[in-house]
Amino acid sequence: MSTTVIDLLDALRAHLNDFDVPPVCSVELTTTAYSGEAQVSLQLAAPHLPGIADGLLAWADTLRQTTTEAWRVPRGDSVHLSVTGRLCGGVLIEVYGGLSFTEHGIGGDLTPGARKTVSLAVLRECANPGEVIL
């Protein structure tokens, strides 16, 4: 079954109506006619690590089958943190935020183009720097 742009927009609209999630600044839709599996990609509006981590955690609470990861972009100057999961209707969604790369920051151990899984606990620590999380 082909998923159209309208189907993806309807699924996203329904999700945004049902859940109070942080704002995004960019939306990309990929239909099944183009890729094989439809996907919605959203970039968070937050510019700094605590806001990105907090936003990803909020989105993760509203999705099914979530995974989280850090990806250092191929040119090496930034790291994207993301949560991937499924909306209630099964549509695949990725929510991400980008940070400047630093050797001592999250993803500092990644080579350009590399990815690694990041736990929700790590995102919680990033969202609340300096706090002890039990």
Image (cartoon, rainbow, N blue to C red):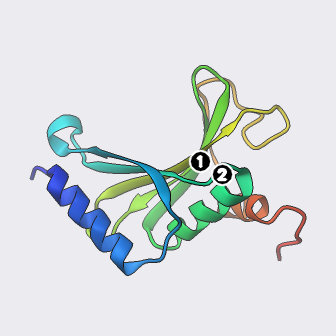
Q: Quadrant of residue 54?
A: bottom right
Residue 55 x, y percent position in the rendering:
59, 63
**Would residue 24 appear left or right of 103 to someone viewing this image?**
left
The answer to whether the residue labelled 2 contacts the one labelled 1, judged by CB atoms less than 8 Å apart, is yes
**Label 1, residues with CA under 10 Å away: few <14, some 14-19, many ≥20:** some
Q: Amino acid at mark 2?
A: Val
Image disc number at residue 17: none
In this rendered view, identify the residue nearer to me: 41 or 91: 41
Front-most of 10 and 110?
A: 10
Secondary structure of residue under mark 1? strand
Q: Quadrant of the C terminus?
A: bottom right
Q: Secondary structure at mark 2?
A: loop
Question: Separation of disc 2 and disc 1 at Cα?
Answer: 5 Å
Task: Look at the picture and state if 74 lies above or below 123.
Answer: above
- Identify the residue at the far left of this view: 1
Badge 1 is on which residue?
69
Residue ID at (26%, 65%): 11
Amino acid type for the residue under numbered disc 1? Glu
Whether residue 88 is visible here, answered yes or no, is no
Which label sits on residue 118?
2
Q: Residue at x 77, y 35 (%)?
A: 108
Q: Is residue 36 left or right of residue 2?
A: right
For marks 2 and 1, the one nearer the N-term is 1
- The answer to which quarter of the image holds residue 77 is top right
